[in-house]
Image (cartoon, grey):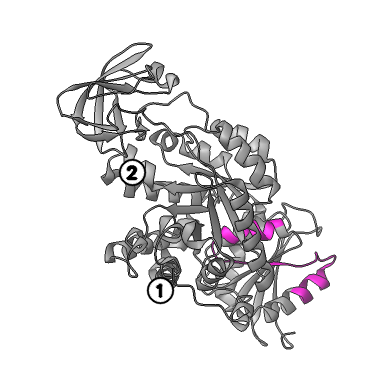
């Protein structure tokens, strides 16, 4: 990995808002598990770090969290951490020879017999699946490379016809795309991991294997208000219950890896657009993930198709784009972050993005006075040519609504809560700053002006648009909009 040391001056400069508004999530792993590497990723544009709980021991994750918080302290910038739970992993058993070749047109049986299998059968050590399968269902093995069709089922075996054959080896994954499986989203491992990461004050929990809104309830009960809950949309059943799942979560992730296995590949782009559209209409942050710059695992430059993939996500107004293996296990993690940074920045400058995002939000239902205030704030920046929006937020809801309008100017979000500041680093366009709460109107105006100057989102003579809730310190209210002219000089 190429990680140049980051100068102290460069790190100090990172206190200023990023000109790019789409956030970048970088997954940490063997290629990015040192303090130097994490500093380099952050300096190159990573806003959020993802911990993949499928790999590594808890003490390794604790060390990564400590490194992230060190970078946070050094830069004076809050940084968000996502702990991505593994979820249930459906796998076949083992074979006598370690693998076998399945021929198309032959029969193959999945059963509960734990003995090693052969070309005729193998164990499927998930008894709950047998009752869910019906004749005609498809079973996908090894990320969809091998396809079986159920012919006959019993309580102990599923007899299948091989539609697409190939070499099948030990412990390969199983996907069943067209059935709601009676499997909880949280495993015993997930519960242990969840308890651990919550003790480490991570900011977001990403839940795998979500099929229905009820799957989020157990995790929500454990998490409480200690972290935000991200629903990973990776199964067709989740798409069928999309609106309710979004309503039950704090954010959603378009997890295109497993989703692309369980639906036909040509369906994925339309599903991605649908998930993004519904999340944005609901005012929930949305992340697009998986294989965005896959070739950069081993190449210092991406393919043109990958650049277009990142660009399309930015055009659609997503809150964040995510790197997985590119930053966790690739040869060029910093370069991958830089590519995402440059592409996102370039697309955001296009007038078509601003128009598309504005139109999308215009069609959303504004059901409260808080939403109306935020909408007017966006319009006020255009009418007054204001340099920025400054929003005071305690729970984060005011800042999220400001982001939802996708304004062309920077959004400076001031909060007394570090946990809120960290969490909202995932949200489009928010520059989060922790500062003591204000107590009266004049103090609000003065602090908004001084903070706008200090953080470089306004200059002397500029106008700023200020939003807040009165009475101060009462979360969930946005009922004040004020336009002020900045004077003085930065502190």
Q: Tag on residue 346? A: 1
Q: Tag on residue 294? A: none
Secondary structure of the residue carrying numbered label 2: helix
Question: Does the image show residue 77?
Answer: yes
Residue 346 coordinates in the image, percent (x, y) = 40, 73
Indicate left or right for 142 with 287 as reference: left
Q: Residues within 10 Å of mark 1 (few under 14, many from 20)?
A: few
Residue at 66% over, 66% down: 70
Residue 294 coordinates in the image, percent (x, y) = 34, 58
Nearer to us in this view, 61 or 439: 61
Along the polypeptide, which appears first: circle 2 or circle 1?
2
User: Residue 32, relative to residue 454: is it above or below?
Assistant: above
Residue 213 coordinates in the image, percent (x, y) = 53, 33
User: Residue 231, relative to residue 181: is it above or below?
Assistant: below
Residue sitting at the far right = 439
Indicate left or right for 104 with 255 as reference: left
- The quadrant of the rendering that contains the C terminus is bottom right
CA distance for labels 2 and 1? 28 Å
Is 423 colored magenta in this rendering?
yes
Q: Residues within 10 Å of mark 2 (few under 14, many from 20)?
A: many
- The quadrant of the rendering that contains the N terminus is bottom left
Question: Does the image show residue 318?
Answer: no
Is 364 colored magenta in this rendering?
no
User: Residue 219, relative to residue 126: is it above or below?
Assistant: below
Residue at 45% over, 42% down: 233
Secondary structure of the residue carrying numbered label 1: helix
Give the residue pinned by disc 2: 260
Q: Total number of numbered labels?
A: 2
Residue mark closest to the camera, 2 vs 1:
2
- State the extent of the magenta-drawn residues as a range: 419-447
Residue at 74% over, 88% down: 488
């Amino acid at each position: 990995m190429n990680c140049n040391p980051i100068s102290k001056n460069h790190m100090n400069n990172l206190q200023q808002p990023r000109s790019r508004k789409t956030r970048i999530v970088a997954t940490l792993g063997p290629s990015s598990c040192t303090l130097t590497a994490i500093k380099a990723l952050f300096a190159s544009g990573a806003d959020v770090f993802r911990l993949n709980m499928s790999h590594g021991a808890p003490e390794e994750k604790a060390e990564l969290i400590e490194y992230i918080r060190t970078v946070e302290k050094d830069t004076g910038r809050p940084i968000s951490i996502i702990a991505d739970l593994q979820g249930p992993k459906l796998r076949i058993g083992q074979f006598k020879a370690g693998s076998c070749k399945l021929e198309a047109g032959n029969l193959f049986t999945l059963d509960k017999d734990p003995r090693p299998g052969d070309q005729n059968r193998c164990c499927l050590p998930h008894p709950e699946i047998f009752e869910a399968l019906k004749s005609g269902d498809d079973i996908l093995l090894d990320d969809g490379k091998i396809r079986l069709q159920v012919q006959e089922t019993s309580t102990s075996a599923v007899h299948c016809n091989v539609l697409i054959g190939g070499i099948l080896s030990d412990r390969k994954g199983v996907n069943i795309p067209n059935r709601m499986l009676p499997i909880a989203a949280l495993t015993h491992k997930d519960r242990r991991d969840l308890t651990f990461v919550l003790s480490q004050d991570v900011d977001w929990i990403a839940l795998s294997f979500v099929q229905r809104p009820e799957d989020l309830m157990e995790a929500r009960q454990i998490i409480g208000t200690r972290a935000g809950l991200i629903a990973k949309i990776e199964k067709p059943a989740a798409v069928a219950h999309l609106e309710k799942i979004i309503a039950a979560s704090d954010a959603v992730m378009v997890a295109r890896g497993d989703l692309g296995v369980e639906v036909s590949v040509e369906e994925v782009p339309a599903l991605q657009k649908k998930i993004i559209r519904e999340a944005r209409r609901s005012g929930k942050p949305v992340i697009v993930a998986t294989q965005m710059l896959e070739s950069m695992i081993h190449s210092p430059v991406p393919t043109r198709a990958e650049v277009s993939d990142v660009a399309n996500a930015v055009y659609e107004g997503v809150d964040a784009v995510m790197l997985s293996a590119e930053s966790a296990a690739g040869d060029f993690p910093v370069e991958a972050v830089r590519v995402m940074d440059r592409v996102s920045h370039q697309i955001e400058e296009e007038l078509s993005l601003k128009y598309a995002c504005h139109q999308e939000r215009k069609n959303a239902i504004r059901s409260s006075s808080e939403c109306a205030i935020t909408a007017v704030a966006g319009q006020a920046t255009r009418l007054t040519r204001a340099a920025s929006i400054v929003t005071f937020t305690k729970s984060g809801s005011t800042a999220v609504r400001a982001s939802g309008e996708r304004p062309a100017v920077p959004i400076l979000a001031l909060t007394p809560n570090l946990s809120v500041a960290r969490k909202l680093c995932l949200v489009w366009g928010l520059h989060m700053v922790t500062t003591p709460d204000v107590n009266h109107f004049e103090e609000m105006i003065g602090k908004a002006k001084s903070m706008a100057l200090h953080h470089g989102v306004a200059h002397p003579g500029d106008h700023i648009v200020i939003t807040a809730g009165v009475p101060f310190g009462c979360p969930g209210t946005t009922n004040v909009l004020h336009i002020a002219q900045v004077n003085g000089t930065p502190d």
